[in-house]
């Protein structure tokens, strides 16, 4: 059997506003393999799709005992349940959702026990970096405070992509929309940025996926 050795990609040691690091921060980036960050306990984890669109995956950790507020996955249920879930759970044995993976660019289903989530998500390691999001303006897109974003600077830009946009004041993670070209938050309380009226903004890369840890190591 071939051994997969993922190529680490830069992990910027600051957060993007959901601003983003100053360009100088890239020099302080440390290499990171996603598997080392995402899997709280690899031997007890499995990956399952949520829904039928192939865009959301759950990292389930069978070694975790549920505590108040945990999300639980049950094979017979279409939706996640919050612990304690009372009669909904019954005698069923649910698995604690340790992390979620939201895909913005589709990937083939890797199956429940992928050799490497890093290899699954990152196709161009030398054009990719990782950065954490801060704030909750993109929560409607599955980007939460503390989510790890996988950013590819070599992707073609499409309407509806989640992107990193930067200017002298900082960087943002937003959705790119056309007609007119603009940056849109996942929260109606945040105004759109019309790009023709904001020439200071440059689009730095396309967000491939957002990874959010709910339980596990710190």
Image (cartoon, rainbow, N blue to C red):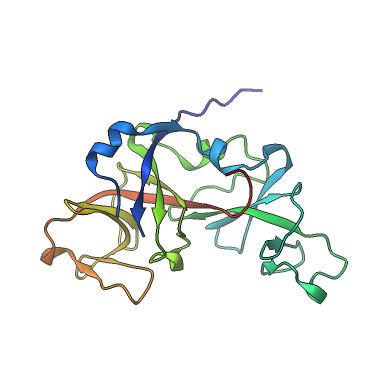
Whether residue 182 sits left or right of residue 47 in the image: it is: left
Res 113 quadrant in image: top right
Q: Residue at x 45, y 39 (%)?
A: 122
| Residue projecting furthest to the right | 91
**Residue 76: percent from left, percent from top:** 77, 66
Above or below, comparing residue 108 to residue 145 in the picture: above
**Residue 22: percent from left, percent from top:** 24, 44
Above or below, comparing residue 127 to residue 191 in the picture: above
**Residue 141: percent from left, percent from top:** 44, 64
Q: Residue at x 30, y 43 (%)?
A: 153
> Which of 143/181 is in front?
143
Above or below, comparing residue 173 to residue 82 in the picture: above
Res 169 quadrant in image: bottom left
Q: Quadrant of the C terminus?
A: top right
Q: Residue at x 72, y 67 (%)?
A: 83
* Total numbered circles: 0
Q: Residue at x 34, y 63 (%)?
A: 160
Whether residue 63 sits left or right of residue 157 in the image: it is: right
């Amino acid at each position: 059997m071939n051994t997969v050795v993922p190529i680490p990609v830069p992990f910027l040691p600051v957060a993007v506003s959901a601003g983003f690091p100053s360009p100088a921060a890239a020099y302080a980036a440390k290499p990171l393999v996603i598997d080392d960050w995402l899997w709280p306990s690899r031997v007890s984890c499995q990956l399952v799709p949520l829904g039928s669109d192939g865009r959301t995956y759950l990292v389930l950790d069978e070694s975790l005992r549920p505590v108040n507020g945990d999300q639980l996955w049950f094979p017979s249920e279409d939706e996640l349940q919050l612990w304690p879930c009372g009669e909904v759970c019954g005698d069923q044995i649910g698995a604690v959702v340790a992390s979620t993976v939201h895909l913005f660019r589709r990937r083939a289903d890797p199956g429940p026990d992928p050799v490497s989530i890093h290899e699954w998500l990152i196709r161009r390691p030398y054009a990719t970096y990782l950065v954490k999001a801060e704030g909750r303006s993109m929560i409607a897109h599955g980007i939460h405070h503390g989510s790890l974003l996988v950013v590819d600077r070599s992707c073609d830009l499409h309407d509806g992509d989640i992107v990193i946009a930067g200017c002298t004041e900082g960087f943002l993670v937003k959705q790119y929309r056309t007609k007119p070209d603009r940056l849109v938050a996942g929260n109606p309380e945040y105004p759109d940025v019309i790009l023709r009226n904001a020439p200071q903004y440059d689009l730095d890369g396309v967000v491939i996926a957002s990874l959010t840890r709910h339980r596990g190591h710190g």
